Amino acid sequence: MKSAENTNERNDYDFQTTQPKWQKVWEELKPFKVDLSDSSKPKKYVLDMFPYPSGDLHMGHAEAFAFGDIIARYWFQRGYNVLHPIGWDSFGLPAENAAIKRGVDPKKWTYENIAQQRQSFFNYACSFDWDRVLHTSDPEYYKWNQWLFLKLYEQGLAYRKASWVNWDPVDQTVLANEQVLADGTSERTGAVVEKRKLTQWYFKVTDYADRLLNDLDKLEGRWPNKVIAMQRNWIGRSEGADIDFVVEGRDEPVTVFSTRPDTVWGATFMVVAPESELAAELVSETADEYKEAFAEYLVAAQRMTEIERQDANRKKTGVFIGRYALHPISGAKLPIWAADYVLADYGHGAIMAVPAHDQRDYDFAETFDLPVIQVAEFVDKETGEVREPELTDFPIIDTGKAINSGPLDGLSKQDAIQKAIEVLTERGTGRASKTYRLRDWLISRQRFWGTPIPILHGEDGELIPLPEDQLPLTLPSTEGLDLTPKGKSPLGGAAEWINTTDPRTGKPVKRDPDTMDTFVDSSWYFLRFFDPNDDTKAFDTEIAANWMPVDQYVGGVEHAILHLLYSRFITKALYDMGMLKVQEPFTSLINQGMVLSNGAKMSKRSGGVNLADELDKYGVDAIRITMAFAGPPEDSFNWEDVSPAGSAKFLARAMRIAKDVTSEPGVDFSKGDETLRKATHKFLDQIPSLIESFKFNVSVAKLMELVNITRKTIDSGSGAADPAVREAAEALTIVLSLFSPYTAEEMWEILGYEPTVALVGLPEADPALLVVESITAVVQVNGKLRATLEVPVGISAAELEDVARNTAEIKRLLETSEIRHVVVREPKLVNFVV
RNA sequence: GCCCCCGUAGCCCAAUGGCAGAGGCAGAAGACUUAAAAUCUUUCCAGUGUGGGUUCGAGUCCCACCGGGGGUACCA
């Protein structure tokens, strides 16, 4: 008898029984299936960044998807028509590497992992619409990737050019920027990344640089500051001027960009990037001795690794190329140098060097003993006074008024910049200009497991877009195909696939051997969820008009730049083509923090906590609510600092409340204990704003608080039969379902209702029960707490001051001093200033 | 170097400019138990990184610094 009771107690949170039980019910009821055409309810589009199917879910997924799910379930409860879909970002190199390593088909590896993750998500009680799943590696999906490519090509936004790319010498393939670590090594192989010049496909993101930058203002307050800042830096707009320098023996002037056109009078030499076409051209017409020196320097620069090259402390190197530019104002002869501190693909690949006012130019001038001309005052930081600079004060960056600069003399830095642009514009040798750090998006990859590029190459080099009715261009079978990296795309080896004919002329042509960057796949997937099975179009423009933008996006900060920037770019491009009515895809964004183990990031190498083990030990509900309770969602936390066991204990306590309720469903709550009723309604009043401001940890604390109060009412108050106990239990159950759906379903059933609790609306708080009759007022003297008073809420300022003044403690304190003035904030506070 | 975020109890975290504590973890005591676990009850613990400022009043706003985390860096 006793032991049976004990067993029951331990089973109050019996996840091993409840999980399979409710999974069956959910499978039948499909509570989260959405009808997009239902306009009777307002829409909410809640989206989690779709996962890459490398193995099973891990702690990071568990955290992020818990947050997304809480938000989605909340909007279901508020009666919204909620689109909360899931898919897989299932093209990519890990599948290909697994294929090479273990000799399995990348498709098999990928889809087996997807099946496993899908089951794990379902078990994790995610409120997805399971009837609208997509995988980017399905031909039904990547057909529309190819369609998108062709649309961009039509618009001139997809083009080919030869450029320097990251090359992994071990994997023998190009790498995406994000696969190159800060130290210049490959994330995957650890090899030092090389640069290779290859002809590749690019998307013209730079055309949208200004809009991508300016529209960030609209996201202020709704995206994390950090992400907005990172995007601003990435786009890196600099404002200044283009200045033309006439080069002796060349018809066309050389244009340089400068943010400091006010210092043009101080330009003493010019530098071109050694890899630039400009350098090659200038050198081709110089004396042989310079040609040789330059050739040597170019080889040396190219042999350098990224690590060496990026070292800012490195001594400046360069060669004089034997040619001269003429200063646009003074006409002085300025020697032209080639140096690797000037980058070929930024600005115009050439600079005017002003050593007096630029660190890099100064270092270079020092190394090669070039003249330094000061053209702005030096202001001593200590004294704030203008004085003659010592040698060690150079270069002078935070300059005072312009000097030695003709019409600019006496102007402050800002005014001098404006004036310089005016002067240059008048002379026709310069103009205001902007330049960007942002580069065009390299989308070609020498990989097999990706979207084939729908372009045919004619024998004469002609580019022939594949007609739309020939899409999808599917990948060939891996049968007989060597995927081992050899520096060329594996598709090139599929002879039958690569060789085809021009659909218009029947002439032999070759397909493009490269596949697209998988960031192309993810740059528009949020549009495909409207109907992943539509085989007539990528997405329906009318449905998109109703359902875009995504109201809430949830995912990791590791995508702060690339994925989010590309998605914003594609959205704007589709807007310009008239297919979207919005220019920003994601209205609100939250980045989950990291789940750490002993202060360290978890990874496959360092181990850490295994999600499956934790789920086995504590159950889905306890893990989900632990994630929610751990702190603000954007903060990282240590798994050791939180307590899944404590969560399990809490869930058992909540369950016990439901079990203790003895009143029947539909009982009249109005006769219930007023203290508990008020607590319940205050709780119901607080929850919406807490969830909507992502304070999930506080929400859980409120749940715990209400459980504690209800427990007290049952054990030492009006007892389990009190209708207020049922009211509290029902409110608890409904709100708990956001965090711990299995336990909530079980409680809802115990309370005498049919499933599913997920679709029961959040009860409205009764305003009558939110009214507080009396309140504790604070009495301060000089801002220090001296007494507290119990006063009616409706008390007037005069009354409150009077009561406060006549409180014994205050009276005594005020006797000895003179009151200078009194601050009254009825009904909460009185402050006597003496 | 530059940019962003964070410093509240032993620990994780709350606190519309108005009583520093909602909640949890860990600890202590007690109840139940032959005992333990589980459960329940009670309880201990800081003046908010440092120094200024604004204010009747600052954890909260402003400035400087210290400490920690993240991003980025030869971008003209």
Image: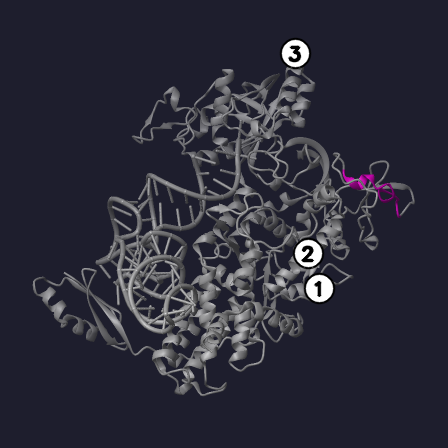
Q: Which residue is mark 3?
A: A289
Q: Chain of mark 1?
A: A
Q: Which of marks 2 and 3 precedes in the sequence?
A: 2
Q: Residue furthest right?
A: A506
Give SS at disc 3: helix
The magenta stretch spans which residues?
A: A489-503
How far separated are the C-alphas under marks 1 and 3? 66 Å
* Label 1 vs label 3, nearer the camera: 1
Q: Mark 3 belongs to which subunit?
A: A
**Magenta stretch containing residue A491, yes or no?**
yes
**At label 2, which amino acid type do we have?**
Ile
Label 1's element?
A: loop
Chain label for disc 2: A
At 76% across and 50% down in the image, what residue appears? A150
Instruction: Identify residue type, mark 1.
Output: Asp
Q: Which residue is mark 1?
A: A531
Residue A63 screen position, x and y as percent:
53, 57
Question: A726 above or below A24?
Answer: below
Residue A178 in sight: yes
- Residues at marks 2 and 1, CA–CA distance in whole angstroms: 20 Å
Which residue in the structure is indicated by mark 2?
A114
Residue A387: x %, y % from top left: 33, 25
List x then y, in percent, for residue A355: 48, 23
Q: Earlier in the sequence, mark 2 or mark 1?
A: 2
